[in-house]
Amino acid sequence: MARNLEFLVVALLVFASSCESAIFNPVSESHRSAALELFSPADGSFGSLEETYEALKTCEVLGIEKKPDIRISACASVVDTLLSTSTAVKDLFHALRVNGILKCELNDEAFAGIESRLKDSLNNANSLLDFYYSIGGLVLIKDQTSAVDVLLTDADKISRSIKALSQSDGRWRLNSNNPESSNDAAGKALEALAGVISLASSEIDQSLIATLKNDIAKLFDGVARYDDGTCYFDEKLVDARGHQGPLSASASVVRGITAFAEVTTESLNVRVSTVLGSSAPPLTVKLMQTFISGSKDASIIDQIVFDDPEQKKNYATGGRTKVPIHVTGAITIDSAEIAILDSDIGSPETQKKLDLPGENAVALSANHLQKLMLSFRLTTPSGHAFKPHQDFLGLVEKFYYLSGKYDIQLTVGDSVMENSFLQPLGHIELDLPDAPEKAARPPPQPVDPYSRYGPKAEITHIFRAPEKRPPRELSLAFLGLVFLPLFGFLAGLFYLRANLKNLPKSTVPATFAILFHLGIAAVLALYALFWFKLDLFTTLKALGLLGMFLMFVGHKTLSHLASTSAKLKSA
């Protein structure tokens, strides 16, 4: 449901909750006759443009077809007023309202001059009526022509200047020097603020919109009621000159709320079809009445009106229709605390404040003889107490008498609560007694059939502690003993006068001989790497490759030596 209807419905429900017996009768011919008698022009015109607008608007609202013919005189007065450079802002406002109905002949240059004067007046405004007439005039220009730029670049500043005149009870003051507030001024302030929002060149601060909605809700707390149940807004009589009667004050409030609701949200779109499901002809769904039967249940009565009256011959609308509705809102949570009590009426042993909704991490402990108390207060946007649906469970039985640490979660929700929440609060350490013999046992925990195919727990190998190593000196002495055979081998070669005389002289045999000795050196280096770094399998792979290489070059080298030795013996 669109929010502008929702906003109006909330206001109407406030009326309905305290004005259930009010009866609304349709406009009759007697009402029209009384209006014609009341608004009778003298010499073809009324005394002022304000009276002219009231007469024309009344005839339009009541559907009076035989209106007084005052167009010529009224338009002449409108043109003279709007083109005059000495006209007061109030008179400009009423002239523009009359022009909105009669559509007098005015060019865009005239509207541009009026727009400039209204903005100058708005910049110098120091009272609520100055804001009301200046902003109202700009809104009327916007509705009557699109050739003039009436947007406000400092709309947020103007809105806050008007808001500064509001009171805590929802009523407003006419200026900062007058401490008296009134409902009539509240209606004018809301109407002016609605105009600022519609003329703003950028979006108005949403926190200000929310504050204004709260002020409207407070305004309805002062609704009075006649004996027949009819509701109205009364005024305190400050002085006879500035006093507004209940009818004028109520009309001002209704105009202000209606204007504010129209600019802050979208309109309601209702889909209407025939009983066979086909599209209906162009029509309008009018909100007629609103009823409230409880704290949360409400309904509205609407009526379908065809745009073309001839369609009444082809379709039957069924009269008025009663539709149930739900009005939702954001609930305020405060005064939240959790405590451990020694008894139902005892003083709290442990008491902690909570932030709801917010992050909380309380740590509590209790036994089966103590009480856990959780308290908080819920308030509607209009300041009334709110009671959501709640369930209370026995804790000890649900815990199956198992002591230990338990998490605490709070769930607050309702079908009309827009900010329902599930909030973890912390944990509580429970010390519970042993379970009685006939107490229920905890149900078996469900086992996921697919868990057998999931990853298993990681296996961590624990190796035995390394054995104690010998002293460093002993290791170095052993290393020296290992190298002694090498020194003996070198000494033996020197003693036997080993030489390289038998090394082949030709290029190919010499190459094979050098590669053979390099291969042996590579094997020795591989042994050293195996000792310091390589594992057995890597060493064996490398040794196999080196072995085949040594077999090939060694065979070539030894074949050459054998051939050379055979030639020497035959010679």
Image (tube, helix red, strand yellow):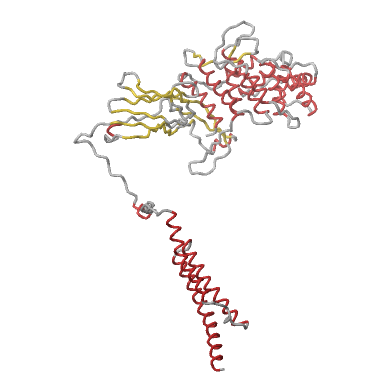
Task: Place residue 400 in its image quadrant.
Answer: top left
321 lies above or below 569: above
Q: Is residue 325 visible?
A: no
Q: Is residue 149 above or below residue 169?
A: below
In depth, the one of 34 and 327 nearer the eye is: 327
Residue ranking furthest to the top? 239
Instruction: Give the x, y percent position of residue 64.
Output: 63, 23
Q: Nearer the viewer, residue 70 or 458?
A: 458
The answer to which of 413 and 323 lies nearer the viewer is 413
**Closer-to-camera residue (332/479):** 479
Residue extending furthest left?
437
Q: Is residue 281 above or below residue 521?
A: above
Residue 552 visible in rendering: yes
| Residue at image coords 63%, 28% | 204
Residue 163 horizontal side relative to residue 419, left or right: right
Judged left or right of residue 504, residue 231 is: left
Q: Position of residue 34 (x, y in %)?
A: 60, 15
- Counting from the top left corner in percent of width and height, residue 439 is at 22, 36
User: In the drawing, does residue 88 fall left or right of residue 476?
Assistant: right
Q: Residue at x 72, y 22 (%)?
A: 96
Task: Locate residue 29, reporting x and y percent.
Answer: 58, 20
Number of numbered markers = 0
- Toward the front, the furthest residue is 495
- Image height check: is 451 above or below 86? below
In the picture, measured across the screen, residue 436 lies left or right of residue 563, that is left
Q: Quadrant of the C terminus?
A: bottom right
